[in-house]
Image: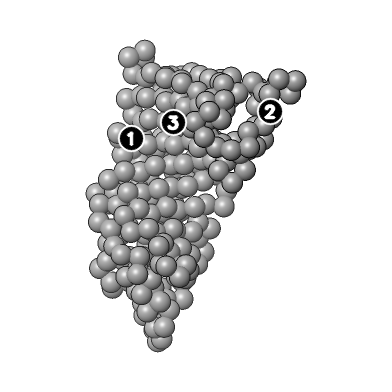
Amino acid sequence: MAKTSDGLSSVVQQIRFVGRGSGAVKTLGGFKKSHHTVPDAVNASTTAFLGKLCAGEIAEEAEGFFQRSKEAFGYKRKDLSLDVASPLAVLTTKDFTLEWAYALDESDPAAWTLTRTLHGVTRSDFLGTEACAEVFGGLFSELVFALTKGASVEAVIDVIEGLEQESGDGDEAEVGAALRVDYPSDCGHCVVSVEGVAATVKFEGAELAMVFPRSGGPQELLEGFAAVRAAFSLTKNKALAGLLK
């Protein structure tokens, strides 16, 4: 695998690649304008209704990934399985798990959201393969980590704001100019921006999510992670440098 992911397994307990989609409920294949009405609330009944409406879409996409994975990775029957129970589906293989989850939009029940999540990667070299790029290219826009060693949000904010105030020469001064942190008044999370890196980093203490402006394959997202990790490692603060070391 490329050097961008070296040492990754020693830092995080879990890596999740996340991709999102959305649309109007009335555009789903199972929606019949002459029989159905658009949901106006999110509850067990409307969620079950959504499951019926999107059954065709989720089954078709999941089956497509089953077939592409079998071909690209050379899997045999025992190497993978597909479970579809609309609005959910799970493709489980010997190397990874890919999940789909349709849901009604909480802020607009007339719309649906689709979350695709790749996790449970079992081999460190898997994500850098050409087959992986072929199957998952352009699918994900978020890289989420459950960290083995977390830190308080306030501590991370204070460190970065301290770097921003540094003056003079040296690595810390350069890092202070390269990092920016934004946060709400309750400090429930913070968003870190790194100069020259398109992705932003949302930190919530035990979990860190990198959000990219456009979708890509797993290896592309890992390269963005490497750039952020390099900026963090230049600081002399052990808590900040250790998050992504």
Crowd band around label 1 with a 10 angstrom C-alpha radius: few (<14), some (14–19), many (20+): some
Reading the image, the residue beneath label 2 is 37
x 42%, y 67%: residue: 186
- The percent position of residue 94, horizontal first and vertical second, equals 32, 25
Secondary element at tag 3? strand
**In the rendered structure, which disc, 2 or 3, sits on the residue that comes first in sequence?**
2
Nearer mark to the viewer, of 1 and 2: 2
- The percent position of residue 164, horizontal first and vertical second, equals 43, 79
Secondary element at tag 1? loop
Residue nearest the observer in this picture, 189 or 109:
109
Q: What colour scheme does the image use?
A: one colour
Q: How far apart are the alpha carbons under marks 2 and 3?
A: 28 Å
Q: Quadrant of the C terminus?
A: bottom left
**In the rendered structure, which disc, 3 or 1, sits on the residue that comes first in sequence?**
3
Nearer mark to the viewer, of 3 and 1: 3
Above or below, comparing residue 133 to residue 168 in the picture: above
Q: Is residue 189 visible?
A: yes
- The percent position of residue 157, horizontal first and vertical second, equals 38, 71
Q: Is residue 130 visible?
A: no
Residue nearest the observer in this picture, 230 or 53:
53
**Badge 1 amino acid:** Gly
Reading the image, the residue beneath label 3 is 99
Reading the image, the residue beneath label 1 is 120
x 36%, y 30%: residue: 96
Q: How far apart are the alpha carbons under marks 3 and 1?
A: 11 Å
x 33%, y 35%: residue: 120
Judge left or right: residue 175 versus residue 134: left
- The percent position of residue 55, horizontal first and vertical second, equals 56, 21
Residue 45 - label = none
